[in-house]
Image: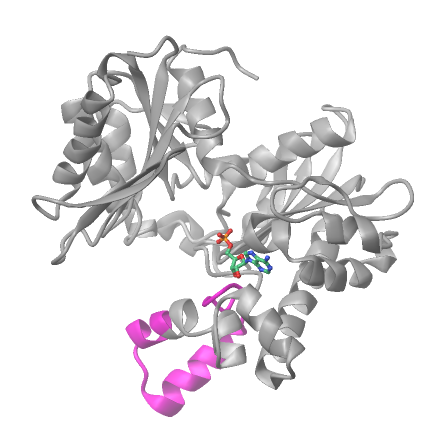
Amino acid sequence: MTESPMVLVINSGSSSLKFAVYAMERRHPLLSGLADRLGLEGATVSFKDESGKTVRDLKEPTHAYALDAVLEEFAARDWSGSLAAVGHRVVHGGERFSSSVLVTPDVLVELEAISPLAPLHNPPAVLGMRVALARLAVPHVAVLDTAFHQSIPPSAYLYAVPMALYRDYGVRRYGFHGASHRFVAGEAVEMLGLDRAGHGLVIAHLGNGASATAVLNGRSVDTTMGMTPLEGLVMGTRSGDIDPGALIYLARRTGWKWDDMDTLLNRRSGLLGLSELSNDCRELEAAASSGHAGAQAALEVFVHRLARHIGGLAMSLPRLDAVVFTGGIGENSARIRSMAVRRLKPLGLSLDEQANLRMVGGAAGIISEGNRPVAAVVSTNEEWMIARDTAELAGLTRSQ
Ligand code: AMP
């Protein structure tokens, strides 16, 4: 048994269960891993800690066996008595949840009722919660990707379609990546010495999924993702914004059905669709440098859309103190950041080339010249944010 209470963070998907274990004084997990290929043949579970990585076969390819394997590992490390709370990542909290919440039977029922809004994501998360609740008699907390954005005003979240669609079907913009945007906003305020009660930020979370958010005094006031995580920026395989008229046209012209459109826009578009090469930014940068026209076009469209959205989000704020880059691309790609910041001149930003090149691999700091607004890089840590919320709601720590 270890001295300090531990928090287990679970991200339960349809065919995977990701986990991480935190001792609350440390931002880095003591142990993390992934149960993969659940529901399929050849399911495995991996464990990673400071001493390396091990992979084992799972007895049965189910979420229950996956969690049992994690708990066996806990027991083998003599940690079972130290586990004090479990945090669950949940994609969609609809309009019901505007902050993280202790999981009760009523909360599970409410999350199930929201499932039609995220049919691929919420049901496995609820399944993961049920499996964990049955095994672990400690407080469980749900941390919702949408919750941070519930402060967005109706002018920013309503689509200009008949209001009955909002009332009857919940058609509106919800926004996602909430844990990341909230964490990065907090880190940026600290790092830049901003007033907690008087700041305006645009956070660009650029990873395989990408979204940007306008944050005013710690609250989200606008964001690029919409009713689903498909709207907004160009992503690895997701299109981001597209004229719905193009889809109507394609459906009429080709006879494609909605499932075909779903695959097209979520899996075959974005950087992959544009480049006809890869969804991976690093690979595209290398290809663009050796003259691959598709890779070059993909990066240019990515940056154009990004700059346009950052500019738009700045207009949702009464003041702009910083544009903050995060996520795998935002934290590591000096090239994308350089291309983007150059486009943000009308906002008063100019790039510090040398500082920009230094900010890779987890380094955080300012990459622009001059005073406010600044461009900066911050490393995101969604799982740590989930662990923090969980510890707080479980009464292990005080609010930060
Ligand atoms: P994430 O989803 O946050 O893990 O981000 C994944 C994306 O970050 C992929 O497109 C990677 O190619 C990209 N990425 C990671 N490292 C680099 C790098 N050094 N340069 C450019 N892109 C990178």
Query: Which residue is at 20% across, 54% downward?
Result: 37
Up/down of 252 relative to 269, above or below: below
Which residue sits furthest right?
A: 370
Task: Count the marks.
Answer: 0
**Left or right: where does residue 211 sit relative to residue 268?**
right
Magenta extent: 235-263
- Locate residue 73, reporting x and y percent: 21, 29
Up/down of 78 relative to 208, above or below: above
- Locate residue 207, reporting x and y percent: 53, 55
Q: Quadrant of residue 233?
A: bottom right
Query: Which residue is at 48% across, 46% downward?
Result: 176
Query: Which residue is at 76% across, 52% downward?
Result: 356
**Left or right: where does residue 286 sit relative to residue 116?**
right
Coloring basis for residues: one colour
Which residue sits furthest front?
A: 51
User: Looking at the rendering, in which quadrant would you find the C terminus?
Assistant: top right
As for residue 246 lying within the magenta part, the answer is: yes
The residue closer to the viewer here, 144 or 58, is: 58
Q: Does the image show residue 18?
A: no
Which residue sits furthest bottom?
A: 253
Q: Does the image show residue 77?
A: yes
- Locate residue 352, reporting x and y percent: 85, 52
As for residue 232 lying within the magenta part, the answer is: no
Q: Quadrant of ligand 1?
A: bottom right
Which residue sits furthest left?
A: 59
The residue closer to the viewer here, 239 or 207, is: 207
Query: Which residue is at 14% across, 56% downward?
Result: 42
The residue closer to the viewer here, 307 or 115, is: 307
Q: Quadrant of residue 234?
A: bottom right
- Locate residue 158, reporting x and y percent: 54, 51
User: Looking at the rendering, in which quadrant would you find the N terminus?
Assistant: top left
